[in-house]
Every structure is written in structure tokens, then in C-alpha cells.
Image (cartoon, rainbow, N blue to C red):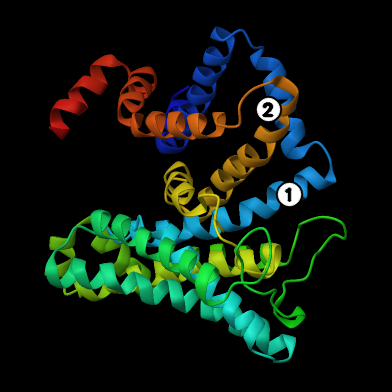
Amino acid sequence: MHRIRKFFLKQQPVFITIIAVLLAFVIVGLILAATGRNPFNAVYFFVRGAFGNMFNTTDTISRVIPLTIAGIAFLVGAQSSVFNVGIEGQLLLGAMASAVVGYIVKLPAYIHLPLMLLAGALAGGLYALIPAWLKTKRKVNEILSTIMLNYPATYFTHFLVLKVIPIEGVVPATPFIEETARLPILIEGTQLHAGVFVMIMVVIFAYYLLYKTSLGYEMRAVGYNKTAARFHGIPVEKRMNFAFFLSGMMAGLAGAVEVAGVHYRFLDQFSPGYGFDSITVALVGLLNPFGVVISATLFGALKTGILEMSVYSGIPRQLTTLINGIVVLCVAAKDMLGGWYARIFRGKDTYEAQKEISQ
């Protein structure tokens, strides 16, 4: 019994997050029941819509790819106490830059595709250096600056596809990229593309960087305590600037992969909110690269499963936003859930004593 309690206490952050997500779905189920809808019927169509057949499953995976890469973008920043809320704007600029390189440049595929992805990553990284400079040199809160910088990126890309490089069509867009700049489709007749391998490399790279290198150790040390890190000789501002740049590069790469693997051009209203969703994905994934993959799978399934659920159950698609919001609230309340969790596995007296000591 002692070993079981010890295991559950050691893995408390994981179980608390799982409980928070389950609690969110229970709350949504109660809301559906209160409006006269069958929550179990809704769950059935949701699962069928996300994983019911090969097409739905691959569609879900294709949405997991940008969510994971963008989630890693937020993660690498947050690990260094850099809260990059401007991932959406960096993703859009990365997508636009990659689309331009994709249709203007004429090169062999083995050069063209990497160059296109690199262009997207650099566009996002360079744009992220603006809030980095504001943070480290002018002490401007990065949450405010990155939120505000989403708007110039959004309207700049909107202006480009409307006035500068538009093509005739219903939706303003850039010309299609060359075949040599496209990620190959892995399963014919589906949307599953080779970007899944890019995603895997990004996850492995982030894990190796953060947990297996001295640079990653210094980045995490800055995230834990800037004063202590500075006392031990770590160049705090340089590590934060690097975290900003790397976070922006990941965000730009997410946009570039979407262009190369899904749309083959930049469209107006390009992103369905991947940059904003990435924050929730990273937090639910406990700011761990592998946890982000699991979390992104959940939110990718939400985006695909909710469509079939709305068609067959009569539930509005806006429910996705409701679920996202409730999940965020439940995860934000994990300290309260952690108190209950600790009471169960430690006992009330032990928990109260440790709480007094921590205060």
C-alpha cells in the first residue's frame, strides 16, 4: 500500500492533469445533459469522427502535427520563463515566408523543401526577436508584447494576399508552391503527409536540448529562478533571447509544414487558431515534449471529432471552444485539485503539516 501511495504522489502532476481533463469533459457532459442532449451519444460520434476510419484518423494526425510543433514552440520558451503568446503571429509569418519561397524559387526537391521550411522557421524566429529585445532591454512584459504583435503579423499577411501577391479565386491566397517544395503524402487519398516526421524530429530535438545538454540545463535554470541562475554565472538575458528565437522558429516551422503538407499555398485566415491552441496544448502536456504529443492528440481529435458530432448529434461546433476553455480552467485549478489529491494519498494531517511548512 505504501508503494502505491508513493507512486501516485510521485506522479501527482500527471494524474492531476488527467483528472483536470476528465473533469472538463464531465462538466461538458453535464451541460449537454442540461440542454436535453445525450452526452453518451455525443461521445460516440465524437470518437467516430476523430478515429472512426482511416480518413478520419489521418485527418486527426494531420492536425496533431502543427499543434505539436506549435506546442513545442511555447514549451521551449516557458522552460526559460519566456511566455510567448505570439505564436499565432509567428506561425502566420512563417507560413507566408515559406509559401513565397515555395512558389518563387526553382530548385531540386532535396534543396527546395528544406530551404522552404528553413525560411518559415527563420521568419518566425526573427519576428520573435522583437519581444525578446523589448523583454531583455526595456523590461516590457512579454505576454503583453507578444499578444500585441499577433495583430501586425495577421494584418500584414492579410494585406499581402489581398494587395501584393493575390491570385484570382474565392479566397485570397498566394500561388501554389512548386511540387519540389511539397511534403509527400504518406497514404494516398488522405491528408497524412511527411510532416509527421518533422514533428517527431522537433519533439526529439526539444527533449534532447532541454534535458541532455548544458544549454538546456541553463535554460531550465533560468526558468526556475533567474536570480539563482545569474548568481551561478548563467547569462540570463542571452538564454532568454535564445529561448525567444527558438520558440519563434518552432512557430514559423509549424506554419511552413502546414503550407508544404496541407494547403500548398498561403490562404487568408490560414490558421484555425493553432498558435493560440498551442498554449493550452503545452500546459496540458505539462511542458514536457512527449506530454505535448499526447495533449496535441487530444486537441487534434477535438477539431476533427467535433464536426461529426455536430452533424449527427445537433451539437454546435462552438462546443470545441467551450471544451478548450473548460480544460484551461480545470488545469488552472490544479493547485486546488492537488490539495484534494494530496489529502487522499497522504492523509489530511500530513497534508496540513506540509502545507504549513511550505508557507
**Dot 2 amino acid type:** Ser
Q: What numbered label is drawn on residue 226?
A: none
The residue where tag 1 is placed is 59
**What is the C-alpha distance between the residues marked 2 and 1?**
17 Å
Q: Toward which corner of the image does residue 174 lie, by quadrant? A: bottom right
Percent x, y of residue 56: 78, 43
Query: What is the quadrant of the C terminus in the image?
Result: top left
Task: Give the left or right position of residue 9, taking residue 40 as reference.
Answer: left
Task: Give the left or right position of residue 251, taking residue 241 as reference.
Answer: right
Is the C-beta separation of discs 2 and 1 under 8 Å? no
Percent x, y of residue 153: 40, 65
The residue where tag 2 is placed is 310
Q: Toward which corner of the image does residue 68 lie, by quadrant? A: bottom right
- Residue furthest bottom as drawn: 107
The answer to whether 324 is drawn above or below residue 247 in the figure is above
Q: Is residue 316 visible?
A: yes
The answer to whether 27 is drawn above or below residue 244 in the figure is above
**Dot 1 amino acid type:** Asp
Along the line of sight, the residue nearer the viewer: 341 or 134: 134
Along the line of sight, the residue nearer the viewer: 34 or 170: 170
Query: Few, some or many C-alpha atoms within 10 Å of disc 1 (few <14, some 14-19, many ≥20)?
Result: many
User: Which residue corresponds to the image point at 54% horizontal and 24% vertical from the top-left?
Assistant: 25
